[in-house]
Amino acid sequence: MARYIISRAAQSVVLLFLVALITFVLIHAAPGGPGILMNDQKMTAAQIKELEANLGLDKPLYVQFADWLAQLARGNLGIAYTSDLPVTQMIAVRLPATLLLGGSALTLSLAVAIPVGIATAIRPRSLLDNVVSALSFVGVSMPVFWLGLMFIIVFAVDLRVMPAAGMRTAGAALTAADLLRHLLMPAVVLAAAFMAGFSRYVRTAMIEVLAQPYIRTARSKGLAARMVLYRHALRNSLIPLVTMVGLALPLLIGGAAITEQVFAWPGMGQLAVQAAYAHDYPLIMGITIVVAAAVIGINLLTDLSYALIDPRIELHAS
Amino acid sequence: MGSEYRRTRVVRQASARLGRNPLAVASLGYLLAAYTIAILAGYVAPDSPTTMDLSAFLAAPSPAHPLGTDDNGRDVLSRLVYGGRVSLTVGLAAVIVSVVVGVAVGLTTAYFGGWPDTVLMRLTDAMLTIPTFFLLLVVMAFFGSTLQNVILAIGLTSWMGVARLVRGEILRVKGMDFVEAARALGASPQRMMTKHLLPQAGPQIIVAASLGTGAAILAESALSYLGLGVQPPIPTWGNMLSGAQNFIWQAPQLAVYPGMLILLTVLAFNFLGEGLRDVFTVED
């Protein structure tokens, strides 16, 4: 077990290193590179040189990368160009909003997808199954931000029942009810994009499990259908769903970023888009690394928890 | 001669089977029509997509402007037609990039194994871990928002699925008798890969390409919506939507049309992809 944990953790570190390398190479391969901010006509060549030296941009690339990694290991992501604040601090301010939006959307999508997946698995090819199947096609074919715009048109512009943007009513005190009202539309929009895929996945896993001999045994013992369904079948179908959620995480975070843009939700995605506009490279690199680290960390945890829970998983397999 | 005959027969059987799937046929018809309109945009569009008429600010539909005008007095229908040209081109071109890279990576890893396999598959894993969206932001921000960069950025962040399926398929057939036979006959590595191994993954690549084109169109629309994709005044369905959001209170219909077209087009690619998957699955 210890060997498995160590090798799996080492893999994660390698992965994170590669992610850092890819982002670093990309930014430095760009024409103008990270120094693009300094393409200011008013600055003299000497001033540009001095600024580059201050930022360490005059050193060889591998030294810059090593410096950056060393700082990264200490949890220091550098100073943002546009605000002169530490990148970690800027991310920390925005993180709660993103976690709230992403977490609510994920919970909501699972809360809908699991019951729907079960219902459609029990009666494949029924009316419900066909409707859900059609909806899931629409769900994966629709731009998330466009669904957001349609929600704004219907609920904010036409019906005037929902706020169109932001996290709180301007000028009003921050209350849970007000926050919830602002959270509802972005969370539903983001969740909608994932409900489709998750419910199809639960359906497939459930149908597969229901065809297993042990289910037949449970039924022939005379157990109630309900009991067999929820106690025996559901548990085993949900295990692979956890992997699926782990794999969907990068998409969820990307979706959250664009949803934040639609609803002016002050999270990390919005920060990333602003950083991209402003060519603030320490900031965008920091965000990318933090997000990738979160995805890698969560996937590592789910893998390890499987190994603990599911005796069928071979520990010494690479 | 013999294999030529076999190939046409397979194609004929496959198209017959696809013909029995009305959704796939309708999707194919829609896509052919959409691409025809996009190619002939200059003849189909009633107006230029960039001519401004400031006296017709957010005008309602009229005989001159069947779908009205936008905030710069530009004809919405013409912009939809020309915008489709950009969105459809990006979709197809980005998928070509991703298939070329994916096939190259998949072939190399599966055929050679060893350290190229380890290195490239770790790279694939890393690419799957980074939320693609942030990578696209980085690329567009630092390399510039040109049509060519949009295509390359989307293509180079979406090849991982193809690489994995090509690798898996080749590893599956690598030990089979016909491959051994070809090797025994002295086929060169190039010949082994292009004539014997890669064709086995062909059907799956076609399915992935159809689904991938839809995904690429979605990615383009998101980038253009954020203002980091193809730049105005060139219309794309995505940047039309970002313009529309500013006037969502006065003219909400502007936000409806481009999104409907994105939805229909991506839906068509997805139905076609699933239809093709069914056709090829029966064959196996």
Image (cartoon, rainbow, N blue to C red):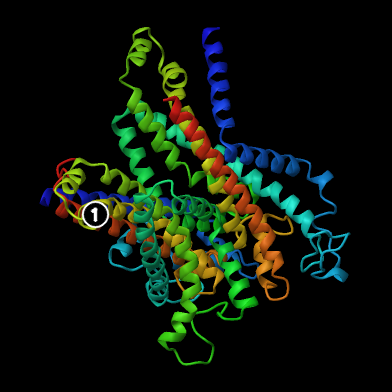
Quadrant in which residue B23 is drawn: top right
Is residue A280 something that shows in the picture?
no
- Residue under circle 1? A225
Helix, strand or loop at mark 1: helix
Label 1 CA crowd tier, 10 Å (few <14, some 14–19, many 20+): few
Q: Quadrant of the N terminus of chain B?
A: top right
The residue lying toward the viewer, choosing from B24 and B219, is: B24
The residue lying toward the viewer, choosing from A192 and B167, is: A192
Q: Quadrant of the C terminus of chain B?
A: top left
Q: Residue at x 72, y 56 (%)?
A: B235
- Picture coordinates of residue A3, whole percent (x, y): 12, 48
Report in which chain the residue with disc 1 lies.
A
Residue type at mark 1: give it. Ala
- Picture coordinates of residue B101, whole percent (x, y): 48, 36
Outermost residue toward the front in this view: A222
Quadrant in which residue B190 is drawn: top left
Q: Residue at x 35, y 10 (%)?
A: B181
